[in-house]
Amino acid sequence: MKLEITNAIDKGDKVILEMDYDWEFAAAVAKTFGIKYASEEEIEEFVMMVLEDMTAEDLGELGNKIDE
């Protein structure tokens, strides 16, 4: 399963994420929503929802794991 956030664009009232992901990630998001197929917007909403719930410490730990 792959998710890579390649860019974040600040539009003032919202942030737009540019992402690369594989079909396994899209299928997992769809399953989370209880639907057969997740659109790009639904996938972006899901990723933003998860990121918003993370603390700075959580993000730091995630960064450390990525660096390993």
Image (spheres, rainbow, N blue to C red):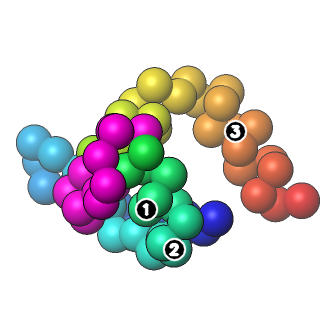
Disc 3: CA contacts within 10 A as few (<14), some (14-19) or many (>=20): few
Which residue is identified by label 1?
26
In this rendering, position of residue 28 left or right of residue 10 = right
Secondary-structure class at tag 1: helix
First of labels 2, 3 by sequence position: 2
In this rendering, position of residue 56 left or right of residue 68 = left
**Which residue type carries mark 3?**
Gly
Image height check: is 40 above or below 30? Answer: below
Image height check: is 23 above or below 29? Answer: below
Residue 9 on image: x %, y %: 26, 62
Between 38 and 4, the one lying in front of the other is 38
Secondary-structure class at tag 2: loop
Image height check: is 3 above or below 42? Answer: below
**Which residue type carries mark 2?**
Asp
- The residue mark sitting in front, 3 or 1, is 1
Secondary-structure class at tag 3: helix
Range of residues picked out in magenta: 32-43
Which residue is identified by label 2?
22
Residue 48 on image: x %, y %: 35, 42
Between 23 and 19, the one lying in front of the other is 23
The answer to whether residue 35 is magenta is yes
Q: Which residue is drawn at 55% across and 65% down?
A: 24
